[in-house]
Amino acid sequence: MSTRPVGARRLGLLPPYLFAEIERKIAAKKAEGVDVISLGIGDPDTPTPELVVRRMQAAVADPGTHQYPSNRGREGFRDAVAGFYDRRFGVTLDPANEVIPVLGAKEAIANINLALLDPGDVALASDPGYPVYTMGPLLVGAEPVPMPLVPELGFQPDFSAIPADVLERARIMYLNYPNNPTGAVVEDDLFTRAVALAREHDFIIVHDNAYSEITYDGYVAPSFLATPGAADVGVEVFSLSKTYNMTGWRSGAVVGNPDVLGAYWQLKTNLDSGMFEAVQEASIAALDSDQASVAAMCEIYCRRRDILVDALRTIGLELTPPKGAIYVWARVPEGETSASFTEKVLEQAAVVISPGSAYGPSGEGFVRMSLTVPDDRLIEAAERIAGLVNA
Ligand SMILES: Cc1ncc(COP(=O)(O)O)c(C=O)c1O
């Protein structure tokens, strides 16, 4: 083999994968027989609703789903997404050119950068935020610029703090409410102000709507597209992953501005061959259902949120109880950093939590804990952390 590094130069642009070292340590602990509890990843522990599984079983048996799908998706899939958006958000979508199926929100977010950005363009990325908002732009030679979510503003960005030259070069702004990792929901007129800013500076807003259906205390999350003028300047990425416990199925949709969708579709026809049509059928069943599974799931997460929030407050960790999404975002104890506290909790309590710094520079000083483990394991994890902090 040649002495030249195997990876392309662009891979060298990516920061080290912070979770790799944690994963190595978990594996080592498990090999020693240690009972590790992981609150590290947001992967639902309860199954996909039965009606979705049943539709999938029938669809898989149907040879009509076995061939190459179209990247535009089945008409039934596009209709189901449009119907859901109408019933749930009061947003009217034209199924013909305002809906495209995606292989999960991650695929859509990563590839939208390839469709919309040129080298040197800026992508404004919520910080802390889902890491793909920065990795996606980096992989296409663009410049991700962190847009700090300010705790005092309810984890919303302060648009007035974005430098003028950055705004001039911005082509995309990533927003995400209900928010991963902070659990914040959109407040006041943030979306309206974002639309005005996008108009003024001619950039596209990509709203990541992965958690709209997982909210607590009676809060109902809006779609970004319900904001007047939003469809002129942006798109929304909707995911079935967390909504219907379908993370492994890879199903979602990009909806909104037809020009953006056209560019994304043009790219996609060269990258992949669309979503397995049986998965599209199962997704239709999920979207058309009475949403009882979603209500039941929110009840489970809400109970777990209360368990974890109470336990963490008892030991003095500062936090705002999340109103949405599936994470608790807490400040680390005095004298600790995100990395040192994460390491201590893993080493001494055998509990995996995520360092806030993995989600961007503004995540430093915080940790994220996921609610996707059964109640008894969550209680056990909280007790172990309490024992450690109290000691
Ligand atoms: C904010 C956010 N966006 C997108 C995703 C990815 O979702 P999908 O499974 O649809 O790719 C996640 C997954 O954790 C997420 O937290």
Image (cartoon, rainbow, N blue to C red):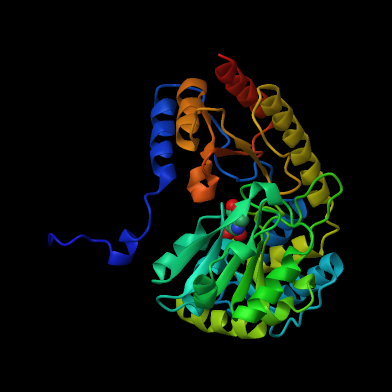
Q: Is residue 108 left or right of residue 209?
A: left
Q: In terms of depth relative to the viewer, which is nearer, 213 or 60?
A: 213
Q: Residue at x 70, y 51 (%)?
A: 153
Which image quarter: residue 284? bottom right
Which image quarter: residue 291? bottom right
Q: Is residue 144 left or right of residue 147?
A: left
Image quarter where the C terminus lies is: top right
Q: Is residue 211 above or below residue 122?
A: above
Residue 116: image location, x then y, percent: 51, 78
Residue 100: image location, x then y, percent: 64, 76
Q: Residue at x 62, y 36 (%)?
A: 330
Q: Is residue 360 above or below residue 207?
A: above
Residue 278: image location, x then y, percent: 64, 67
Q: Is residue 274 visible?
A: no
Q: In terms of depth relative to the viewer, which is nearer, 357 or 298?
A: 357
Image quarter where the N terminus lies is: bottom left
